[in-house]
Amino acid sequence: MLSSTPIRPGSRPRTLAAAALLGLLAVFFLPAGPADASAPLRQHAAARGKFIGTALATGPLSNETQYRNIAATEFNQITAENAMKWDATEPNQGQFNFSGADTIVNFATQNNQQVHGHTLVWHNQTPGWVQGLGATAMRSAMQNHISQVVGRYANNAAVVSWDVVNEVFEENGNLRSSFWYNTLGQSYIADAFRYARAADPDARLCINDYNVEGINAKSTAMYNLVRSLREQNVPVDCVGFQSHLAIQYGFPSDLRQNLERFAALGVQVRITEVDVRMQMPRSSSKDTTQANYYRDVIQACLAVNACAGVTIWGFTDRHSWVPDTFSGEGAALIYDENYQQKPSYTAVHNALDGGTPSDTTPPTTPGTPVASNVTGSSATLTWSASTDSGGSGLAGYNVYREQGTTDPQLGQSSTNSINLTGLSADTQYQVYVRARDGAGNLSSPSSAVTFTTTGGGGPSGPCTATGTVQTQWGNGYVIQPVTVTNSGSSAINGWTVTFTLPAGHSVTGSWNATLTTSGQTVTAKSMGYNGNLGPSASTSFGFQVSRPNGNTQTVSGYTCASP
Ligand code: 9MR
């Protein structure tokens, strides 16, 4: 089934590129017939119109036969784990070294695999000479790097996509204060995409990040950036969700929903670096949980048309970045260190195969939660448990705050109880619970419990708030940061910022504060973690607003009070 025509870097005349690309697209993307149940992962993925990929390291690729064989047999997509990064490809200014990158690309070509280029502009693994440049020199070094690296593979049919910028956000959704941002400002992102498009008009250009799998401040910032870049005709074609998961931190159960909101922007989405680590030692129950996470990642991608595929960040526990980075953790991949398939391999296989009947029966509705131990920033909720009869088993509960059109998720629990923290002082909460099974089915919502957090009880004092318009587009804008400062001479515990929305404007999202709207007046209250401010100390929150098309007003004028 797979074409065996060799494709060599740079050897194909440009005029043949389209035809060759079509052939490859057929191999990589077009649904084939159903695959044999015991077939390798790549055949099942191809039958579903998706890729299944792995990151590869050049060391074991040249030294270990088993590594090479499994990489060739099981996967139809490859990402270089390190070989295409700046420190490898341009260690000294203007001196390019493509030996590792070519090793990866040649391997992929021989095995009819597509390559995702990783990564052009990043704050890590970039040599010191780049970091020390002034603005003009840094921008031209970036342009030259992108045009040399992307240009080298522009006529190579295996190399189909690039991570143009990687990890540009902080966890709170601010742009990362990297040397790129600090020297060039936000424009470096749009510039990088334009340089990449110029170097290869046919490549798919991606922005990639971690901790953006669920809907949160960071992924919402990424969503807003991608939307605004595309409105400015910046060539962003694709969004990568790294998905470095850990069984002890829970599964991002809104992954599919999050992929869908990005897909609605018209971009391709892809899972770019999934691994699922655990605290060592392994156990069969940890292996089962891990297998469920892999299954759920694959199923989320299968459920979203715009999701091109899933890349696993390596495939064998013998070669994984995890133990070197997270002390005491490991076993994050689908083969063990002796190249034996783990339950997670079977889970990926079965999810791609789709042959196993999937569970579509949601768990029963949980009981109404009962609130106890309510303080100024926390509360404990307990409810009677759900049961699941669909086959995948009860996985846990999602806890939501009732808040009108979109109810934010306050937390997840694997048991029928949760300790909510980070609540705002002196605030009424209506909270309900939905049970979740292993296939991601959600039960009907329970009835809600209503409770009010205590006043916080701490000292009050004067404070100030100022807001900045971070970005705006035709019918919306983001205010970020709103900086809240304790302007008094003693500590405050809790703050309340109020502001007025221009007529026709409404808040569509917020982070690092709890917002309630009454008419056009919005009240933003501190969270449990950012309400305590010493004298002169500051914190910040942000929010997003939609407005009528053509209207250019934004929010201005903020009043601060404590608590
Ligand atoms: O797996 C990579 C590891 O070998 C490198 O030492 C590390 C150094 O920065 O980068 C690892 O890969 C990262 C990837 O390039 C970007 N997303 C996070 C990955 C894990 O850290």
Image: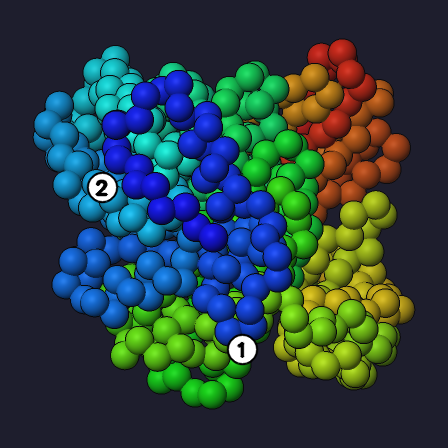
**Disc 1 Cβ-to-ligand 1 distance below 8 Å:** no
Answer whether labels 2 and 1 touch (C-beta < 8 Å). Answer: no
Q: Which mark is residue 289?
A: 1
Q: Can residue 72 be seen in this snapshot?
A: yes
Residue at left 78%, top 43%? Answer: 516
Answer yes or no: disc 2 within 8 Å of ligand 1.
no
Q: Position of residue 267 (x, y in %)?
A: 59, 34
Residue drawn at the location 40% of the way across and 24% of the way down: 16
> Residue 470 is drawn in which quadrant?
top right
At 75% across and 67% down in the image, what residue appears?
441
Three-letter code, disc 2: Ala
State the separation of the CA atoms marked 2 and 1.
35 Å
Q: Is residue 455 left or right of residue 101?
A: right
Give percent across and percent down for residue 26: 52, 42
- Which percent across, then down, holds residue 472? 62, 21
Q: Tell whether 208 sits left or right of 545.
A: left
Mark sitting on residue 501:
none
In-front residue for pair 13/385 = 13
Q: Residues within 10 Å of mark 2 (few under 14, many from 20)?
A: many
Q: Amino acid at mark 1?
A: Thr
Q: Which sits earlier in the primary sequence, circle 2 or circle 1? A: 2
Mark 2 — residue? 101
Local SS, label 2: helix
